[in-house]
Image: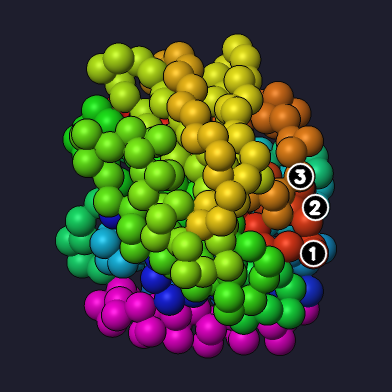
Amino acid sequence: MADMTAGPLLCPIADRSQVGEARRRVADLAGRSGLDDVPRDRLALIVNELGSNLIKHGGGGDLIARALAEGRAVELLALDKGVGMPSVDRCFEDGYSTAGSAGTGLGAVRRLASLVDVYSRPGGTAIVAEVTAPEPPSSSPAGWQVGAVCLPKGGEDACGDAWSTSAESRERLAVLVVDGLGHGAGAADAADMAVRHFAPQPSRTPGVHLAILHEALRSTRGAAAAVACIDRRSRTVTFAGVGNVTGAIVTPAASRQLVSMSGTLGHVAHRIREFTYAWSDDAVLVMHSDGLSGRWDLERYPGLIGRHPSLVAGVLFRDYHRDRDDVTVVAARVRPS
């Protein structure tokens, strides 16, 4: 399953005029992604409420939209660096407001969206909401939740990063993150080529995946990439990486960094090595390109590990992305009961 569709969109929101522009861009994203049966009225109202909330309570922020084609949904991620919500539950009650407004916005989001999750603390709030078509299939692989932010460098139309996931069963999930060399169309071509050749099968270990991608990318400018396979039966994660795509396994008790080797797939990859790590069902797998600083630490965000993976990816993007590069952050975990 590849989560690559038209978009995604980054909509900076600093004033009310940008909320209207975000509504138009998100509606266009849904249309270009073939999601014509996603209710446009609900989508517009939620964009309006999240955008207005960014201005009123966050002093401005970013609205990120991506189409979940297989889930027949549009995901909206609102990120700000404001003072945070004094009480998340109360902020979703109709009539409650800290800005002197009617206090119906977030309550409307909860009623209109098929999924809403929030992470808020002093220093910022992140809200994820999904608007789905009638009776859609799951937007994540069976048994798993996956969230991601994948955006081009500022000023570029094409993103040189890409990612994909595939659930071989409810017990096994494979995740690919790829970073095409450089920026722009050439980097995007390399990343797209890698995604097209990523076909998880039980017999393909992460090292085998990278060896296949190494041959497939010889006609491109090359890429850094990593593949992680989570196996709940063996309670392990097998990981192989070449270049500057990295990752970590984070649990409530500890964080374990994953090891990538030097090189560039498609050009020079002298050693492709697999490493095996312990996995538990309370863990989150985080993988990212070097558009995200490696200095992040989820211990700075109490409770975030238990929220939707899109909030994990969104908060890390908000606080640690590098403006000079494409950026991809993917977070995956076992779907809660």
Q: Sequence-wise, which precedes: disc 3 or disc 2?
A: 2
In the foreground, 307 or 107:
307
* Colour scheme of the picture: rainbow
Quarter of the image containing the N terminus?
Answer: bottom left
Residue wearing tag 1: 324
Q: Amino acid at mark 2?
A: Gly
Q: Sequence-wise, which precedes: disc 2 or disc 1?
A: 2
* Residue stretch in magenta: 15-39
Q: Is residue 114 above or below residue 192?
A: above
Secondary structure of residue under mark 3:
loop
Q: Is residue 64 magenta?
A: no
- Dot in front, 3 or 2: 3
Q: Amino acid at mark 1?
A: Arg
Q: Sequence-wise, which precedes: disc 1 or disc 3?
A: 3
The quadrant where residue 171 appears: top left
Residue wearing tag 3: 293
Is any part of residue 216 visible from this angle?
yes
Helix, strand or loop for the magenta stretch, by majority: helix
Labelled pair 1, 3 in contact (Cβ < 8 Å): no
Distance of label 3 from label 2 (alpha carbons): 22 Å
Q: Amino acid at mark 3?
A: Ser
Quarter of the image containing the C terminus?
Answer: top left
Distance of label 1 from label 3 (alpha carbons): 11 Å
Residue 44 in percent (x, y) is at 47, 78
Q: What residue is shown at x 74% (from left), y 38% (from top)? A: 294
Distance of label 2 from label 1 (alpha carbons): 24 Å
Residue wearing tag 2: 82
Locate residue 10 relative to residue 336 in the image: left or right.
Answer: right
